[in-house]
Amino acid sequence: MSTQLTDNKDFLAGLLFIFIGGVGLYVGMGYTFGSFDRMGPGFFPRILSGILIGFGVVILLRGLRSKAKVMGRWGWLPLVLLTAALVAFGWLMEHVGMLPALVALFFLSAYAGHEFKVKEVAILTVVMCLFATAVFVWGLGLPYPLIGFGD
């Protein structure tokens, strides 16, 4: 029995990775690449996009061979919630600081899952906020306001 490519989960996942990697590569081309010694702002976007495209090609080819069908329906609510979590994080990070942005990110992302438990998400959020503060603000000295209003 043959599976249509539009029903092949690995083929579709490969296409998605290639598309996202292509968008990242296109955006990264607007920045200078630099060299391995002096990396420019376009270095990581281009390298990571190339890796993502490579993974996409491998998964797409695996899908052509395996013919595994997509099971179930699209989960539109999780897709919307995960997208909203990322957008909220970006906006909140700039306007109210890193900690409120992380809280929104974790709670919205966790709510997109099958099992949402407020206590578990709260513990995870506290631990990850402490970790992010230790690494990015104290360790690397990045100028991220923890809590505060932007311009």
Image (cartoon, rainbow, N blue to C red):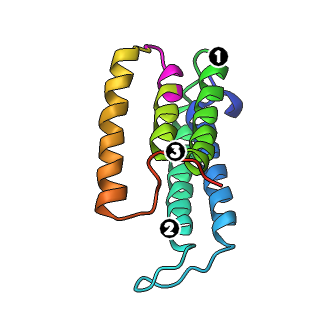
Relative placement, left or right, of 76 versus 111 is right
Q: Can see residue 11? A: no
The label nearer to you, 3 versus 2, is 2
Q: Nearer the viewer, residue 58 or 138?
A: 138
Q: Position of residue 131 (x, y in %)?
A: 30, 45
Q: Quadrant of residue 63?
A: top right
| Mark in the foreground, 3 or 1 | 1
Separation of marks 3 and 1 at Cα, in angstroms: 21 Å
Residue 92 falls inside the magenta stretch: no
Specify start and end residues of the magenta stretch as a single range.
Answer: 108-115
Q: Which residue is mark 3?
A: 59
Dot 3 crowding, Cα within 10 Å, few <14, some 14–19, many 20+: many
Which residue is disc 2 drawn over?
44
Residue holding disc 1:
73
| Residue in the image at 51% along x and 42% along y | 62
- Amino acid at pointer 2: Phe
The residue at the point 68 percent across, 64 percent down is 27
